[in-house]
Amino acid sequence: MKTQKANQIISYVSLFGYSCGDYAFAFCACLLASFCITLTACIGGGSSIMGGGNTGISGVGAVSEFRAQSGLALVSAASAYHGGHDGQSVKVGVVDSGIDANHSELAGHATGGGDWQSASNGLFDPFGHGTHVASILGGARDGAGMHGVAPNASLYSYRILNALGYFGGKTGNQMVPDVVQASQRHNVTILNNSWGSHTEINDLSKAQIETRLAQELAAWQEAVADGMVIVWAAGNDRDNNVSIRAGLPAYFENLKP
């Protein structure tokens, strides 16, 4: 079944209901374990966490941060931390509404990117969605609040959504090729996409997708061929099938993980 194939793409487990525009899908509180292991790394030792196991980190503040982000236990992030993986030397691109680089959880971690909605480097976020996504992905382990799945990852902001969470009259065909090229210049290895449309993968045929998303599709294929890991949110609304972009591997073999 095409829907079964579509769900094989590296995707999200949706845990939060977040009010978004049509193009700003609610990101999920945790990533599937395969993605977390790719991103994360660790620091040995540590205290036990609720439900058994070990956080792979040490210090009261660090353990409290782990507990404050329930998604970390759900994706077994502690196993990655024990293996020495916390995102160090990993560059992750966040394609979204921008990132507030002054946020306490992200200061010093979000260092560059691009902006296709205004003349900036993408390191501001008038909508807030991208900052929330970035914090779940790479929020700092600093003894306060919570920390992200990969607290030592370097984050790059590629802003394609406006202050209302929409494309704002632009299209994926116009913006995505530039985003992919920018991420390649920055040597980003993982590109996170917590946005999409309400069109499901089964709503269009392969030929229709090739026509409507021609430039965008070519850019995603180029990124995957270049070794980049592309991560998509499955969708917001408990639809029967994943959104069109998350489901592209159902039609295109060269996009399968």
Image: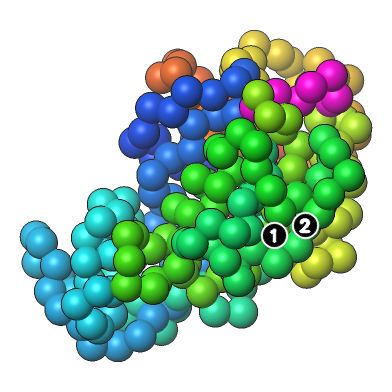
Q: Nearer the viewer, residue 201 or 44?
A: 44
Return the x and y of residue 2 as percentages of the image width and height: 56, 25
Return the x and y of residue 161 as percentages of the image width and height: 72, 33
Q: Residue at x 35, y 85 (%)?
A: 43
Q: Is residue 71 visible?
A: yes
Judge from the rendering whether residue 10 lies leftward or rightward of residue 212; answer left or right: left
The residue most toward the left is: 51
Q: Nearer the viewer, residue 221 or 112?
A: 112
In the image, the segment drawn in magenta is 165-171
**Magenta highlight on residue 168:** yes
Please tell me how many numbered marks the rendered image carries.
2
Residue hosting label 1? 156
Return the x and y of residue 109 as percentages of the image width and height: 60, 68
Return the x and y of residue 20 as percentages of the image width and height: 54, 24
Sort mark 2 into few (<14), some (14-19) or many (20+) by Cα contacts within 10 Å: many
Q: Residue at x 65, y 24 (%)?
A: 164
**Magenta highlight on residue 49:** no
Measured Cα–Cα span from mark 2 to mark 1 = 5 Å
Residue hosting label 2? 113
Sort mark 1 into few (<14), some (14-19) or many (20+) by Cα contacts within 10 Å: many
Q: Is residue 225 visible?
A: no
Q: Which disc, if any, is residue 132? A: none
Callouts 2 and 1 close, C-beta under 8 Å: yes
Give whichever of discs 2 and 1 has the lower sequence position. Answer: 2
The amino acid type of the residue labelled 1 equals: Tyr
Say above or below: 116 vs 205.
below
**Helix, strand or loop for disc 1:** strand
The amino acid type of the residue labelled 2 equals: Gly
The secondary structure making up most of the magenta span is loop
Judge from the rendering whether residue 72 lies leftward or rightward of residue 154; answer left or right: left
Q: Residue at x 22, y 66 (%)?
A: 64
Q: Residue at x 54, y 79 (%)?
A: 88
